[in-house]
Image (cartoon, rainbow, N blue to C red):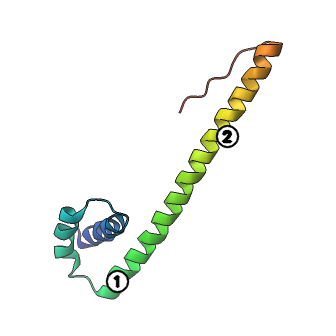
Amino acid sequence: MQLSDITDRATILKIKQAHGLPVHEELAMCMKEAEKVDQDMFDELLAINLEMWDIEAEIGKLYLKLKGLTDKRSKSKNRITKKYGGHEEHKKY
């Protein structure tokens, strides 16, 4: 594995650890190699991955909200279908 990939993994594991996930052993292994990278380069990659983590969290929240609204929409349409006829809609995720 390339040093850049190990460093990327180490920064992601640092973020996971900061969020309380149990990654200590894997992080320790990655950091043995990632410590070879200049601190400013490590910090830059960490900052990028932190921003990506936040965006992914926002996307996850939006996905759950959208899924909930889609379910409500489907139920509403199915009530109309039951009353006035037609085929019920069943969404699968």
Q: State the residue lying farthest toward the top.
A: 85
Question: Which of pointers 2 and 1 indicates the residue nearer the eye?
Answer: 2
Residue 8, picture quadrant = bottom left
Sequence-first disc among 2 and 1: 1
Residue 92 location, x and y as percent? 55, 29
Name the residue rendered at 83%, 14% in the picture. 84
Is label 2 in a helix, a strand or a loop?
A: helix
Q: Residues within 10 Å of mark 2 (few under 14, many from 20)?
A: few
Q: Which amino acid does label 1 sit on?
A: Met
Task: Give the vertical position of 81 relative to 30 (above or below).
Answer: above
Label 2, label 1: how many angstroms apart (C-alpha)? 42 Å
Q: Which residue is drawn at 71% across and 15% down?
A: 87
36 to 48, vertically: above or below: below
- Amino acid type indicated by mark 2: Leu
User: Could you say which quadrant of the image residue 34 lies in?
Assistant: bottom left
Density class for disc 1 (Cα within 10 Å; few <14, some 14-19, many ≥20) is few
Left or right position of 69 against 5: right
- Taking the spot 55% from the left edge, 55% from the top edge, the residue there is 59
Residue wearing tag 2? 69
Q: Outermost residue, front direction?
A: 20
In the image, residue 39 above or below residue 78: below
Residue at the disc numbered 1: 41
In the rendered structure, the answer to whether residue 92 lies left or right of residue 13 reads right
Q: Which of 84 and 2 is in front in this view?
A: 84
Secondary-structure class at tag 1: helix
The image position of residue 11, as x and y in percent, is: 33, 71
Q: Nearer the viewer, residue 2 or 16?
A: 16
Q: Quadrant of residue 70?
A: top right
Q: Where is residue 48 in the image (x, y as percent from the top left)?
A: 44, 73
Q: Residue at x 38, y 75 (%)?
A: 46
